Amino acid sequence: MNFFELAAKRYSVRKFKNEHLEQSVVDKILQAGHLAPTGCNNQPQRILVLNNDSSIEKLKKCTKCHFDAPTAMLVCYNKDECWTRKYDGKTCGVADACIVTTHMMLAAFEMGVGSTWVMHFDPKAMRETFSIPHNIEPVALLVMGYPAEDAEPADFHNQFRPLEEVVVCDEFENKAL
């Protein structure tokens, strides 16, 4: 499958088989995240892998959007290791974590693993539950597993705004945004 087919077919899976991912599959997904580009290649990402019943039960106390997935990965970044833009002090930690998450999400789909990118989680509860240090910032939660036989995309999955509404050429001046 080429990239455009993969991007078009991948969807947020919200119904999973009750089966943890094999370690070899987890390792391949993590390798895809490891290959992701980051600001100045600083690689500030830190990934918490939750792939057993005990960890998943703890996760359920931190988010209602777990979809009973048997596996999850919390993608974070180390605030002390991010590249920082000198003009305004903006760091690329969130962007780096999002790129890593995207790589992992697409690699998972290619291997037959479904996932949903979850932002709806309680960061404070995550920190306390999983002993996350203060310099590590949680960004994205990938709940994942093998899709259930009756898993299907949400109704709105294939609804897209026209490209002309989301792309501006040359400059934003006088453009309806």
Image (cartoon, helix red, strand yellow):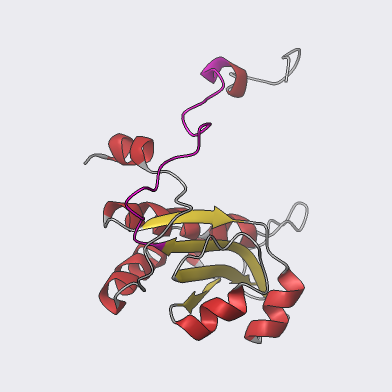
In the image, residue 14 sits, relative to residue 73, either above or below, namely above
In the image, residue 74 sits, relative to residue 9, either above or below, namely below
Q: Nearer the viewer, residue 100 or 151?
A: 151
Q: Is residue 129 left or right of residue 41?
A: right
Q: Is residue 90 left or right of residue 21?
A: right
Identified at 30% across, 78% down, the residue is: 23
Q: Is residue 164 visible?
A: yes
Q: Position of residue 121 (x, y in %)?
A: 68, 64
Q: Is residue 133 magenta?
A: no
Identified at 72% across, 14% down, the residue is: 175
Identified at 33% across, 52% down, the residue is: 109
In the image, residue 92 sits, relative to residue 71, either above or below, namely above
Q: Quadrant of residue 91?
A: bottom right
Please identify the quadrant where the N terminus is shown: top left
Q: Is residue 157 left or right of residue 109?
A: right
Q: Is residue 79 visible?
A: no
Q: Position of residue 119 (x, y in %)?
A: 64, 56
Q: Is residue 3 left or right of residue 36?
A: left
Span highlighted in magenta in the image: 145-164
Q: Position of residue 137 (x, y in %)?
A: 67, 71
Q: Quadrant of residue 78?
A: bottom right
Identified at 63% across, 84% down, the residue is: 130
Main secondary structure type of the part rendered in magenta: loop
Q: Position of residue 132 (x, y in %)?
A: 66, 82
